[in-house]
Amino acid sequence: MSDAAPSRAPSVSSSPVDAGLSAGAAARRLGVAVTTLRTWHQRYGLGPSRHEAGHHRRYSAEDMDRLQVMQRLTTQGVAPAEAAAWARNAPLGGPAPAPRDGGSPPAAASVVRGLVRAATRLDAPAMRDILCTAITERGVVSAWTDTMVPALVEIGDRYRVTQRFIEVEHLLSRTVTEVLATAQRAPGNPRILLAAADEEQHTLPLEALTAALGEAGVPSRFFGARMPSVALLDAIGRTGPAAVVLWSQRPATGTVDQLIRVRDVPHLPLVVAAAGPGWPSGDLPPGITRLTGLPEAVQLLAAI
């Protein structure tokens, strides 16, 4: 270990801002809306401190450091008033405040609130940071069930009530896809085949399953959305998987004949599984396993 003094953590004020930044420039530097800065100024006193006669106030380097603390904490789900108090009082350039419970990850509900706030302001970098942190600290399964799904459900509920925020849902879904795609991938020959049912366009749960299997050391092949039955059967014949999982989100795509055709291939996979709410709720055909959740799916497929 080195006895050298730790260097100051990099911040948005690392580049010269001696002349101060306008509200627009400060917002661009932070990646937030100008209206957000105005709210932080008017409600919490985190405004520009530099003033010259005849000119608008401008944000100094110290102001920017405080705003960075405010942004980081609100993104993590800390209440704005509490985050502002930290931003006003924390030593500039010091480490981010530790969680109040002594260092454990933030409560799941707080993380979801932070993710929904970031999504609502269309802040993709903040969303990626929250999601990557959730996976690193809790693993893919917990990040999916405790963070991603609740946030997606909340945004979806807002859309159904207001007929607004579809752009928020799209950007959040896209960011979830990007983050899951960067999760660990297991080496080796994939023996698990994952695909969405014919004409099924929803694939986020399968993307989560792919990432969770990789984290568990289980390689898989994921074929994405709208997998035609003929192409699926061809892929099964060419790769000889031990398990095939078909996802259906909507009843219109959950026709059991797709599952029966997979079950009846000459070299039957050990497991043919139906996942998702689109499949019929009653008994499935013999030889078909119903998967009801991500933890169960990972446990079953990892044991093959």
Image: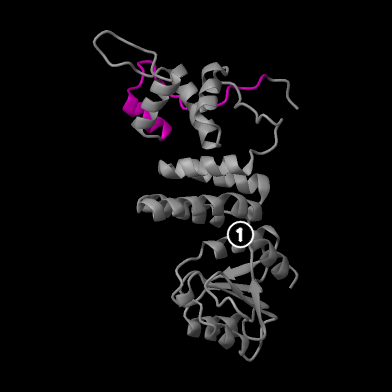
Where, quadrant-wise, is the N terminus in this rendering?
A: top right
| Residue indicated by mark 1 | 211
Residue positioned 42% across, 31% down in the render: 30
| 120 shown above or below 304 | above
The x and y percentages for residue 295 are 68, 61
Q: Is residue 158 left or right of residue 76?
A: left
**Residue 13 x/y as whole percent:** 46, 23
> Going by the picture, which residue comes out furthest to the top?
53
What secondary structure characterizes most of the magenta part? loop
Residue 303, given in percent of the width and then of the height, sits at 75, 70
Q: Residue type at mark 1: give it.
A: Ala
| Residue 14 makes an appearance in the image | no
Name the image quarter holding residue 8.
top right
Using the image as rendered, state which of residue 78 and residue 185 is in the foreground: 78
Magenta stretch? 5-31
Please tell me which residue is depicted at 51% across the width and 23% down the height of the picture: 84
Residue 107 drawn above or below residue 26: below
Where residue 17 appears, as percent x and y from the top left, is 39, 20
Is residue 266 shown to the viewer in this render?
Answer: yes
Q: Quadrant of the C terminus?
A: bottom right
Q: Relative to residue 105, is residue 277 drawn left or right?
A: left
Query: Is 15 included in the stretch rendered in magenta?
Result: yes
Q: Any magenta on residue 279?
A: no
- Residue 270 in which image quadrant: bottom right
